[in-house]
Image (spheres, helix red, strand yellow):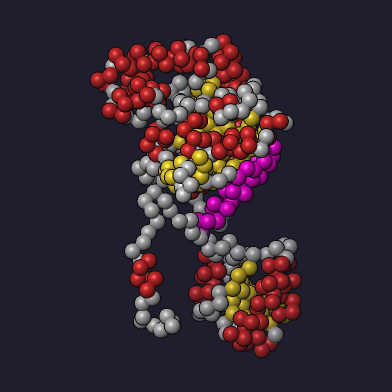
Amino acid sequence: MWSRPGIARPFETALKNFSAPRGTFDILPPDSKRWQALERRIDEVCSRFGYGEIRTPIFESTDVFVRTLGETTDVVDKEMYTFEDRGGRSITLRPELTAPAVRAVLEHDLLRTPPVKLYYRGAFFRYERPQKGRFRQAHQFGVECFGVEGPEGDAEVIALALEVIRSSGIDEVTLEVNSMGCATCRADYRTALVAYLDAHRDALSETSRERLARNPLRILDSKDPSDKTLVADGPKIGDYLCDACRAHFDGVLALLDAMHIAWRRNPLIVRGFDYYTRTVFEFSSDALGSQNAVCGGGRYDGLVESMGGPPTPGVGFGMGMDRLLIVEQSSVGATDGVGSRGGIDVAFIALDPDSTRLLVPPMYALRKRGVAADMDYTRRKLEKQLRAAGDAGARFAAIVGEDERKAGDATVQDLSTRERARVKLVDLEAALLGRLGK
């Protein structure tokens, strides 16, 4: 009853005023092809490195994050999406994916056969001001390596992250590394840092003055110019490392050198969550502006124990998939289906209803043989269909109109050279497979 032209459908009238919530976005063709390509690269690289995929719920008990991230972190204090479910339980949309991975590892007793090497990808949620590369629903890829105490684990996850970045055709990234020490040596550094910053309290930004008592290490990565000037002259964590932490960090750097992975030491790099210890690192790109981190991670030897598990060393990272794709497009342009509607090999073009029905079987036959093929069933003019086929990335077009149909033929056009050839319809599948090299 709603098919009459000129009559507005009730749901159309209602929906026209809706849009995606602020800080979220829809992933539509052709961009979805870029996401699929990235996911394939992630799967391939992680498989090469011996990591298996884990998938966890998008929401968890709030305690999973409060206990692991720390009550004084900005994420817990200001950014989590927390609600009470119908059973009166406090539930939080995951603001990161490491803590859920640890929960799953403990729940399913995976630590009985270490090391445990996992990777994941999925959405996470934070209420913060949206900007380039930062969203309220973002997407993260990450890995976690449990049970490896030595610097080999740190070096491996850094190398894995770099391999995924390079697989996207991105060369212009910077790796910065630091050590936050262990609980003992970091406590001495924290005391010295607080004393220094407190003596210069008036020069701190308002946000950093709030952090001074609650989470002073976060002041180190403040983007405020006055804060940056102040901390540049302050105490450095490297001067407070104990012998064991210094030896561990030196081991990580030696392994990076041995793998020819360029690095830069940045004493101001910290991670925002309480569970990090020793090695911390970031990959960054100028393509993202001031919020330039593509990937961040480090070691968290106390995290599993904080969630009720046995003492277990761990190291991993989180990589913003949204950000990585922004950098990819800036660095190498549209690739791997970007700019195409479907990334097809062959476009079947029918110019009348009978030709449409005639082309369906050979199109299906090619699809069964692993060839990406599609047909524009609207039967628009030939020129428009050819243009759409080129936009879709097709290499060849198989054209049938009344003349071809009556002769039992099809016209095969090479869309790059515009060369055309007539082939018998019965030979169309074989002719296209031959041209595709299959």
Give the position of the N terminus as an image quadrant.
bottom left
Q: Is residue 430 left or right of residue 413?
A: right
Quick check: 132 above or below 424?
Answer: above
Closer-to-camera residue (100/17)? 100
Residue at position x 56%, y 15% in the image: 245
Is residue 428 covered in magenta?
no
Q: Residue placed at 58% from the left, 25% from the top?
A: 305
Q: Quadrant of residue 350?
A: bottom right
Would residue 297 appear left or right of 364 to someone viewing this image? left
In the rendered structure, which segment of residues is drawn in magenta?
30-55
Specify the farthest residue to the front: 87
State the residue at coordinates (60%, 70%).
374
Q: Quadrant of the C terminus?
A: bottom right
In the picture as drawn, the residue positioned furthest to the left comes out as 202
Q: Is residue 29 visible?
A: yes
Let me know if residue 44 is in the magenta part.
yes
Picture quarter containing residue 402?
Answer: bottom right
Instruction: Examine the rendering and report whether any part of residue 131 can be seen.
Output: no
| Residue 189 point in image, percent of width and height | 44, 14
